[in-house]
Amino acid sequence: MKPELSVVIPVYNEEAGLSQLFNRLYPALDALNLSYEIIFVNDGSRDNSVSILAQQFQLRPDVTRVILFNGNYGQHMAILAGFEATRGDIIVTLDADLQNPPEEIGKLIEKMREGYDYVGSIRRVRQDSAWRTIASKAMNRLRENITHIKITDQGNMLRAYGRNVIDLINQCAEVNTFVPALAYTFARKPTEVVVEHEERAAGVSKYSLYSLIRLNFDLITGFSLVPLQFFSILGMFLSVGSAALVVLLLIRRFLLGAEAEGLFTLFAIAFFLMGVILFGIGLVGEYVGRIFQQVRARPRYVVQTILQQTQNDQKHD
Ligand code: UDP
Ligand code: MG
């Protein structure tokens, strides 16, 4: 029994907002008049989220499934695990904190029915702190320039994907990926719609500054080699420049004698170059780390339990 729509929601320490989410999500989906399933993926929550999800599963076992990870593997891994469990033709992802209004899902479905296989979304007015909005815009622009991925608003997870895209994603064994970008690379006919965005209903953001930086490194290094290529070009210019400097200093030494002034300018140049080199090594490390994880080929996440109706249960209904 395949539903038309599968909704995938990652959950990490969301006990404060889950009941509000259920109260809006289920009616919104019921109103769409199509068959659906909701797959919650608990990403190793340490609060009461699991029992709240289990309760909800008991209330609506016909349309609810819950995947429980044994630890915290990150939002994007949780979504990938959810994807593997989906059976619908249209797959929608959504945050658990109600920043993506469930009432907007209908808009995405409408677009999908027009024949698109990837519907991204642009937040009409973004309800996040100012520094995140600014930083995110800057990252958006960088990504735009160094990958072929055209996503206007990359930070928003309210998106719809066709079965063809999800099947391809399920074949990838990528670690630390960025789901909307990965999906975009497989989409034949992508489009975007404008949606509302709300403030987090309850609880706090699960992303620290550090995990945001990590996520953006994964986005860039997972989808582009331009940073590496940039460094080889930069290295080329710098070595030509420093060779010229050596020649210049050599000539000066013979014409004017040894110099001591300007020594600190030289220090400044040297320290700047050291910074550039360190960043370059770090960047190479990012890619090597990626290769390392891929070569190790460990399971990307471990599912502890899945709460779902068995076929026999369904027959009793
Ligand atoms: N999330 C997750 N694992 C994590 C971090 C976040 O599953 O390690 C989930 C979280 O529960 C929420 C979604 O990912 O449903 C987005 O997280 P959040 O709202 O904290 O991010 P923000 O809106 O601040 O970017
Ligand atoms: Mg959020």
Image (cartoon, rainbow, N blue to C red):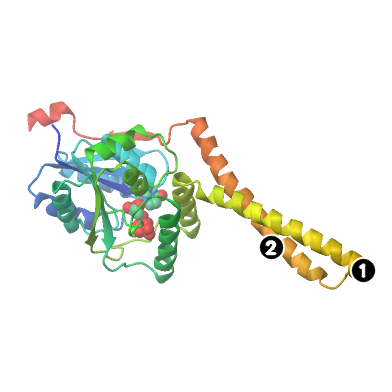
Residue reaching furthest top?
312
- On the image, the x and y values in percent for residue 176 come to 44, 43
Name the image quarter holding residue 269: bottom right
Quadrant containing the C terminus is: top left
Left/right placement of residue 278 relative to residue 289 reads right
- On the image, the x and y values in percent for residue 311 come to 15, 27
| Residue bearing mark 2 | 272
**Residue at x 32% of width, y 67% of height:** 127
Left/right placement of residue 242 relative to residue 30 reads right
Q: Can you see residue 156?
A: yes
| Residue bearing mark 1 | 257
Using the image, determine if residue 315 lies above or below residue 79.
Answer: above
Name the image quarter holding residue 20: bottom left
Front residue of this view, candidates 175 and 154: 154
Q: Which mark is residue 304?
A: none
Q: Secondary structure at mark 1?
A: loop
Using the image, determine if residue 286 lies above or below residue 104.
Answer: above
- On the image, the x and y values in percent for residue 243 come to 75, 56
Name the mark nearer the viewer: 2 or 1: 1
Label 2 – label 1 distance at C-alpha? 27 Å
Using the image, determine if residue 153 lies above or below residue 257.
Answer: above
**Residue at x 35% of width, y 56% of height:** 154
Badge 1 amino acid:
Gly
Q: Can you see residue 274?
A: no
- Sequence order check, earlier mark of 2 and 1: 1
Q: Secondary structure at mark 2?
A: helix
Residue reaching furthest bottom?
261
**Residue at x 51% of width, y 49% of height:** 226
